[in-house]
Image (cartoon, grey):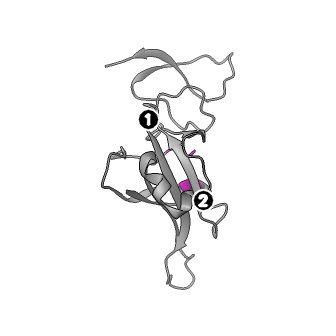
Amino acid sequence: FFLLRVDNAGNVSKRFSSGTFPFSKFGGTCPLWNVHSTFDMPDRLLSQVIELPDGTRYFSIAQTVRRPVAPYPQPQPRFAIGLGCEIRHAAKLVYATGMDLEKIEGTPIGVNCRLCERENCSQRAEPPITRTLILDETTRRVSSFAFSNAREL
């Protein structure tokens, strides 16, 4: 299993993994991950199959939580908790009941924008550090960033 806690600005405040999930040591997480959608539906538990660029698939559940006490007049802090496991273990979880885990298409996510090389992501906030940024003000793309296909070392 892995666990992640983020605030509504996307800042990661806790991350634990007992398996193979590749958390980034710095920066936030992919905005396509359901842990960010929980702030739009605060009382619902969301489930999602996610797929990393290397093809590894995970099952994820996420829900918002509130800190019990906030001094007046400060706003009550909200966080999203994301839990997950490798897809091969997901069928054992009640949250995966009724889902065909082998056939369901996984949401393509990256570890974070700076480490993800997916080109056509509408949620990309930064170009990947492994590619050269291409500046072309005459072309409009799905992503705000165009980058070369050649990896830089």
In the image, residue 69 lies at what x, y percent? 49, 84
Q: Earlier in the sequence, mark 2 or mark 1?
A: 2
Residue at 62% x, 29% y is 143
Q: Quadrant of residue 114?
A: top left
Q: In the visual, does 7 lie left or right of 138?
A: left
Please provide percent x and percent y for residue 107.
Answer: 57, 41
Q: Quadrant of the C terminus?
A: top left
- Which range is magenta? 30-36
Q: How many marks?
A: 2
**Left or right, 7 with reference to 22:** right
Q: Amino acid at mark 1?
A: Arg
Look at mark 1 in the image and give the residue it sits on: 114
Compared to 90, does 151 lie above or below? above
Which residue is painted at 31% across and 50% down in the image? 19
Question: Is residue 47 toward the left or the right of residue 28 in the image?
Answer: right
Q: Amino acid at mark 2?
A: Leu
Q: Secondary structure at mark 2?
A: strand
Mark carried by residue 46: 2
Q: Nearer the viewer, residue 37 or 60?
A: 60
Dividing the picture into quadrants, the one containing residue 4 is: bottom left
Q: Circle 2: is it few (<14), some (14-19), or many (20+) Cα within 10 Å?
A: some
Q: Position of residue 6 (x, y in %)?
A: 47, 59
Answer whether residue 10 is visible to the viewer in this image. Answer: no
The tag on residue 89 is none
In the rendered image, residue 90, in percent from the top left (x then y), is placed at 47, 53
- Between marks 2 and 1, how big is the CA–CA gap? 26 Å
Q: Is residue 59 magenta?
A: no
Location of the N terminus by quadrant is bottom left
Please tell me whether mark 1 sits on a helix, a strand or a loop: loop
Q: Is residue 108 above or below residue 85?
A: above
Q: Residue at x 50, y 35 (%)?
A: 126
- Asked if one can make out residue 63 in the rendered structure from this viewpoint, the answer is yes
